[in-house]
Image (spheres, rainbow, N blue to C red):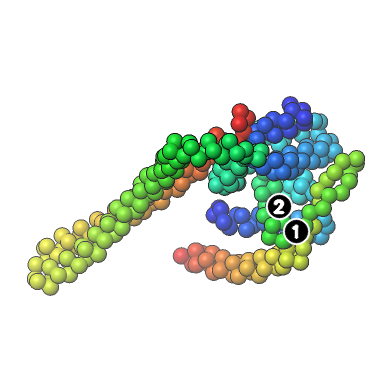
Amino acid sequence: MDIQLKRGLLDVCVLAAIKDKDSYGYRIIKDMKPYLELSESTLYTILKRLETAGMLTVHTAEHDGRLRKYYHITDSGLRRIEEFKEDWKEMLSIYRFVVKEDENE
Amino acid sequence: MNKQEFLAELRRGLQGLPQADIEERVNFYSEMIDDRMEDGLTESEAVAEIGSVGEVVSQILSDIPLTRLVKEKIKPKRPVSPWAVVLLILGFPLWLPLVIAFSAIILSIYIVVWSVIISLWAIEVTVMAGILWGIFCAVSFILQGNAIAGLISFAAGLCFAGLSIYLFFGCAAVSKGILFLTKKAAVGVKHMIVGKGN
């Protein structure tokens, strides 16, 4: 898959993973596992990028006697998900057009 | 390998990055291992699932731009003493040519790589120009009444068209391969800057 496209997809996937409830690194990887394999270092890079872009915030909380980082989605992160949905609605209609062309051949 | 060994090795592998970066990465992996153990894995299983330290370091390095690594490398670790400054100024006839030579080597490698790609595509463009040339000649020969020459030119144009299609896929594959190799090479260079022994 095209690298730029994949990068955009991964960003939105991670945002979706923290959309309803703040989450932490391992859980994000586990939640995404049925859909796509994500390595730790890839996740780290994505989280950093999203944090820099202001789409999520990070806070540290104690868990079981140790510290754990939790990721919280911001308004701009939520907006990004909405944009993604709009974009893909368009993409899907183009896709249907392309597939139909193939079938008519 | 247990968690402490993994983290210590990771720390060694990342030596050369900004200290704060290293701490953050190490904490991140430490949390990942702890969470896996909480999930029911044993310590060594949890570490094994993360992958080898070498792989992890390579992946991390491929995400960091080379310029940032070099900048970090040349940043002095302690305040520069006046004598060091004097030496630096006196030694300038020595280190300046070295710096220029090093940059020239890097630059020439880039130029060589891109020349290969550009020449390949130049051939492709030339062959495509051949199609137009063939058609142009065909038309002008036919207008002059020389049908056989026109037909031959047209056939030549078609040959060029066929060739250009093959060449296009060849060029695309070679360009992709070369870019992939340069990316690999960049990780190799980064490994020379970051890691143990530095």
Q: Residue furthest bottom?
A: B143
Check if mark 1's residue and mark 2's residue have beta carbons within 8 Å: yes
Please name the residue shown 41% across and 48% down the image: B175
Camera-side residue of B146 and B113: B113
Count of numbered tags: 2
Question: Which secondary structure lies at badge 1?
Answer: strand
Question: Which secondary structure lies at badge 2?
Answer: helix
> Percent position (x, y) of residue B157?
23, 60
Q: Is residue B154 left or right of residue B79?
A: left
> Percent position (x, y) of residue B109?
41, 42
> Percent position (x, y) of residue B94?
44, 36
* Residue B38 sits in quarter: top right
> Percent position (x, y) of residue A86?
66, 70
Please name the residue shown 53% across and 36% down the image: B87
Chain bearing tag 1 is A
State the residue position of label 2: A47
